[in-house]
Each structure stands twice: as C-alpha cells, then as structure tokens.
C-alpha cells in the first residue's frame, strides 16, 4: 500500500470532500512533514478536524491513521534528501532539548528492538557464524562502523573473518567473490538503503552462503535477501540515522559467540594480554 499511496491519492482525488482534498493536497506537497505529524496536528495544519483526518486514512484503505502514518514514514525514509532530512528533524524537535530528545528516542528504539527481534533467528545466526569456514561482514556508507566494530572483535575470536566496508558494487564483489555454502555473511543496511549491500547479499545467497541481515524490516532490500533477519529499529535524526539499536545487536552477537567459545578463547586472550603488556599497547592509568 505505502509504495503507491501518493498515486492513490491522485487517482481518487475527484471523490474527496473539501476537507479530504485539503489533507490530500498537503500530503502530496509535503509528505516528508505529514508523515511525522499526529492526526490532530495534521488536521490543524490544513484546517480540518482530527476525525476528518482519521476518516481520510480509512478512505485510503488503512485501518486507521497510525497505519497510514507508518506507510508514509516508510516511504519517506527512502525518498528524503539530506536537506529534507534536516528540515524534518528540526520540525520534529522544535524547541525541545536536542540531547534529551535524541537520547529518549534511542531508548525507545532499544525497547522496540528488544520486543521485536526474533530469538530463534538470533540463535540460528550465532550457530551459523560459529560453524562457518569464513565469515564475511558487509556494511557500507553509514553502516560501515557497525561492520568494522563487529569485525574487530570477531577477528579475535574466529580464524577467518573478512570485513567489507568499501562502497561501490565493484569493490564489494571483489571481496566476496569466493563466498560459498560453507560461509556466513553478516550484512548491515538501514535507510537510505545501500544498493551494493543488497546486491552483495543476493550474490552470496545465490552461491549458497548463509546471509544474516541486520536491518529495520524483513521486507527491506537486505531483509528480502537474508536467510535470518535480526530486526533493529532505526530512526532518522537529521542527517544521521540512529544506530544505537543495531550496535546493541552487534554487542549481543559478540557476547554470545564469546560465551560459546569460552574455553578456546581463554588461551588466546591470555597470550594477547601478554603481548599487549610487553609492547605497551594500552596506557596504564596513573594513580
């Protein structure tokens, strides 16, 4: 439904009442702002009642206004330019304290992620990673830090880990070309979705590799090309996307894998600690 909501509005405009036409006109002209308005605020903005807004949503085929708003938001996150994202963020935050607003938003995303992520998919992901001959970690553009963070820790726990953060389909394919059914791929993608990540995941899956997608929706470009989807809520905050919830999933993967390989890792980390000490890798705190 959300993919053609603007087309549907245009197609059925002749059947709308005067109030509904005002709503439709505003959504068509400023869908980036309308998507984040409550029914009450949207009504006040266009000069109609809240109940008129709710009835409009139902006329459009939705169960209610929240369903239409969600559809608009899903459409918006993939269409907005950086300049538009700043405008939407400033409009949402208004005169509120930015620090408090962002932190509270991150807390809410963590809560939603904890409620919605599949424990079965998480456990299956851990099993596949531990059994894999090679582990590829794919994350480009804004998702690259997630891939790098996970790659840093997994490379200390597993023998063959390849972290792929280069942007561009050519650079990605050059690094994943050898993936096969013995391998696991952990990929990260959030709006605005990178095409090279989805293409890389699709290729690896076609070669028989198990693809673990960390993304915000099972029907996102990455979600549709994954064997196991770890859902993490992300939210648009001005120029950036909140990656707090995805990073929490990364932490959970690291902890789960370390726990499963505790005995093997004890010897390795004992040796690492000796090397770190001998070569002064870390500064010691002075009392």
Image: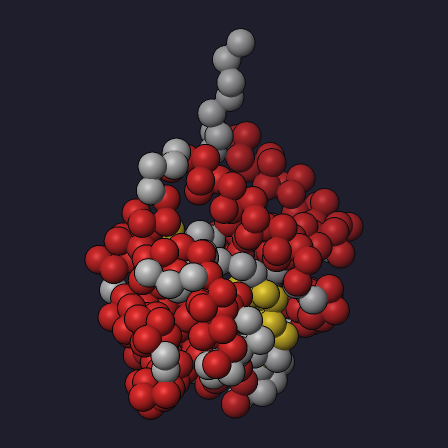
Taking the image as shown, residue 30 lies to the left or right of residue 201, namely left
Residue at the spot 52% in from the left edge and 30% down from the top edge: 278
Taking the image as shown, residue 195 lies to the left or right of residue 211, namely left
**Figure quadrant of residue 27:** bottom left
The answer to whether 4 is drawn above or below residue 91 in the figure is below
Q: Residue 61, can we see it?
A: yes
**Please, which residue is most extreme toward the left here?**
83
The answer to whether 103 is drawn above or below residue 129 in the figure is above
Q: Position of residue 26 (x, y in %)?
A: 29, 68
The answer to whether 188 is drawn above or below residue 280 in the figure is below
Residue at the spot 53% in from the left edge and 9% down from the top edge: 287
**Figure quadrant of residue 11:** bottom left
**Figure quadrant of residue 217:** bottom right
Q: Residue 183, can we see it?
A: no
Q: Position of residue 86 (x, y in %)?
A: 27, 52
| Number of numbered discs on residues | 0
Residue at the spot 73% in from the left edge and 64% down from the top edge: 119
Q: How is the image coloured?
A: secondary structure
**Please, which residue is most extreme toward the top here?**
287
> Which one is in front, 67 or 206?
67
> Which one is in front, 108 or 228?
108
> Which one is in front, 46 or 148?
46
> Which one is in front, 140 or 272?
140
Taking the image as shown, residue 38 lies to the left or right of residue 7, namely right
Q: Position of residue 156 (x, y in %)?
A: 58, 52
Q: Position of residue 105 (x, y in %)?
A: 50, 46
Residue at the spot 44% in from the left edge and 52% down from the top edge: 242
């Amino acid at each position: 439904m959300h993919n053609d909501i603007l087309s549907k509005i245009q197609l059925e405009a002749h059947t709308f009442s005067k109030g509904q036409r005002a709503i439709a006109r505003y959504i068509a002209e400023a869908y980036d702002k309308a998507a984040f308005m409550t029914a009450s605020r949207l009504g006040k903005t266009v000069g109609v009642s809240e109940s008129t807004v709710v009835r409009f949503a139902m006329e459009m085929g939705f169960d209610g206004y929240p369903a239409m708003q969600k559809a608009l938001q899903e459409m918006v996150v993939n269409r907005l330019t950086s300049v538009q994202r700043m405008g939407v963020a400033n409009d949402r935050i208004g005169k509120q304290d930015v620090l408090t607003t962002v932190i509270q938003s991150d807390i809410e995303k963590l809560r939603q992620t904890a409620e919605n992520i599949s424990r079965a998919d998480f456990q299956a992901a851990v099993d596949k990673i531990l059994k894999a001959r090679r582990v590829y970690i794919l994350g480009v553009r804004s998702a690259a830090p997630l891939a790098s963070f996970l790659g840093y820790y997994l490379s200390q726990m597993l023998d063959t880990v390849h972290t792929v953060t280069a942007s561009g389909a050519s650079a990605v394919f050059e690094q994943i070309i050898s993936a096969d059914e013995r391998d696991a791929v952990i990929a990260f993608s959030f709006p605005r979705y990178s095409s090279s990540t989805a293409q890389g995941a699709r290729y690896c899956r076609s070669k028989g590799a198990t693809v673990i997608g960390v993304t915000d929706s099972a029907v996102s470009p990455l979600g549709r090309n994954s064997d196991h989807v770890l859902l993490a809520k992300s939210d648009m905050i001005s120029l950036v996307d909140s990656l707090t919830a995805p990073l929490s999933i990364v932490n959970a993967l690291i902890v789960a894998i370390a726990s499963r390989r505790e005995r093997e890792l004890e010897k390795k980390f004992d040796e690492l600690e000796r090397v770190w000490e001998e070569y002064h890798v870390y500064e010691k705190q002075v009392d």
